[in-house]
Amino acid sequence: MSKRTNKLEAINLDAYYGDFQALKGINIAMEEKNVTAFIGPSGCGKSTFLRTFNRMNDYIEGFRTEGEILMDGRDIYAKEVRVDELRKEVGMVFQKPNPFPKSIFENVVYGLKIQGIKKKAILEEAAEKSLKRAALWNEVKDNLNKSALALSGGQQQRLCIARALAISPSVLLMDEPASALDPLSTAKIEELIYELKNDYTIVIVTHNMQQAGRVSDNTAFFYMGELVEYAKTKTMFTSPQDNRTQNYITGRFG
Amino acid sequence: MPHIDVELDKLKVKLLEMWDLVEYQLQSGREAMLNADQELAKQIVKRDRKVNQFDVKIDRMCENFFALFTPVAVDLRLVLAVLKINANLERIGDTASGIARFAQKLSSPVSMELLELTNLMPMYDEAISMFADCRVAFKNNDPVLAKPIIKRDKALDKIYRKSDGIVTKYMANNPDKISEALVILSIIKKVERVGDQVTNIAEEIIFYREAKVVKHKADRKKKKD
């Protein structure tokens, strides 16, 4: 097996929305600086699981977990963990680009400002670095004060990635980050993921099988709250072990 | 039936049509050789063009399937297997046509003595039988049927290995039949190739159904030792 260390790990994880059990006994370990794709039909629990890594589900009434979620070996649901500190480590990008109705610059440095950083030079440097990492700098460098809402969908999504990167996380969660984008913007996001995995541990939820194949190192298939199969993406898309996986990825489900 | 299965079915049907044609070519080659039938031999050579047309058509169908369906898992393995089986069928077609060309060199039916000494007829019949069984294995998606075919090729190899010595001896004793003996030796070599190509096809069927690579097993064993 690989010598990389495990960045994220779930041990016997159950998750509930009230009486409904959304995740059932999930055990998985994700390696550092790797891309893991979560696939599965709608309602299978993949997004719920993704959101447990930055405790986004905490806001949902009736949501609770049993078992453990570890980041760098530490339980992120432990009492002493501060959620705002956790989110500095774990950035998130959503399906629909969600820039704030502010300038491009203000969007990127938003997280840093919340952290209390006010020095203009630091903010400017962080904005440039993040926009460059998100492959957006060349397109916006002369218009940083323009409203973020004036950007195209693909640019907005890269802006959201830049915003997530600005707070220097080590993990990036992406919930269908390209499903609302055209093929060119999708290709840019996928290239970006390929670049970013040198420095970040990335978990991506996608409904696009080819995308999972192109961007991820490992793939996890979820079905009805269970982790059915978890393997190297190559193996998963050539010779899956479980019939349910095969039926899903070949489009013959149900 | 889902659209993807309709398309995969078309691909399989086309390949099975080609399979029938190539089997007919092999059978005809056997008759042409046995009876020194010049006319039949000529038809076989001509009909090889049809085999080649199937080859091109199936290649194109696979290419389109990859482009339009981006298959994965068992679908991907099926299309990969179809591509390779297609190539092997085309080569078996060439081999049958080669046998017919040698048959054209025969001026009279081959001596029974030479046929019996070399075991060419049982060899030829076994090759055709392996070829037909392989078709059933593919048609029924049956790797269990495909597996013994690989072993059966050993009998053909054995006959081939012995043929050199047998034919040399025969030529020494029958100097008037040297050209005929050389034709038979060449055809034995061709039939041995058919055995290898059928084996390749059987291996592809196992790969497609079980995701297991069984080809070059001997090489890998040697490496381990």
Image (cartoon, rainbow, N blue to C red):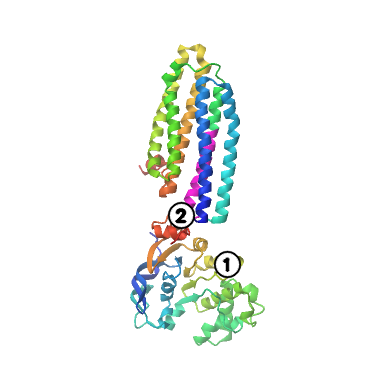
For label 2, the crowd category at 10 Å Cα-Cα, with few meaning under 14, some 14 to 19 and many 20 or more, is: many
| Image spot of residue B35 (x, y percent) | 51, 20
Chain where mark 1 sits: A
What is the magenta range?
A: B71-93
Which residue: 52% across, 28% down?
Answer: B28
For label 1, the crowd category at 10 Å Cα-Cα, with few meaning under 14, some 14 to 19 and many 20 or more, is: some
> Is B4 rendered above or below residue A201?
above
Amino acid carrying mark 2 in the image: Ala
Would you name the residue on which mark 1 appears? A186
State left or right for residue A58 relative to residue A155. left
> Is A49 rendered above or below residue B109?
below
| Image spot of residue B138 (x, y percent) | 45, 43
Question: Is B47 or A106 nearer to us in this picture?
Answer: B47
The reply to whether callout 1 and callout 2 are in contact (CB within 8 Å) is no
**Secondary structure found at label 2:** helix
Q: Which mark is residue B73?
A: 2
State left or right for residue B69 relative to residue B152. right
Amino acid carrying mark 1 in the image: Thr
| Image spot of residue A192 (x, y percent) | 55, 68
Which residue: 45% across, 31% down?
Answer: B128
Question: Is A81 or A59 nearer to us in this picture?
Answer: A59
Q: Which mark is residue A172?
A: none
Chain where mark 2 sits: B
| Magenta stretch, main secondary structure class | helix
**Secondary structure found at label 1:** helix
| Image spot of residue A182 (x, y percent) | 60, 68
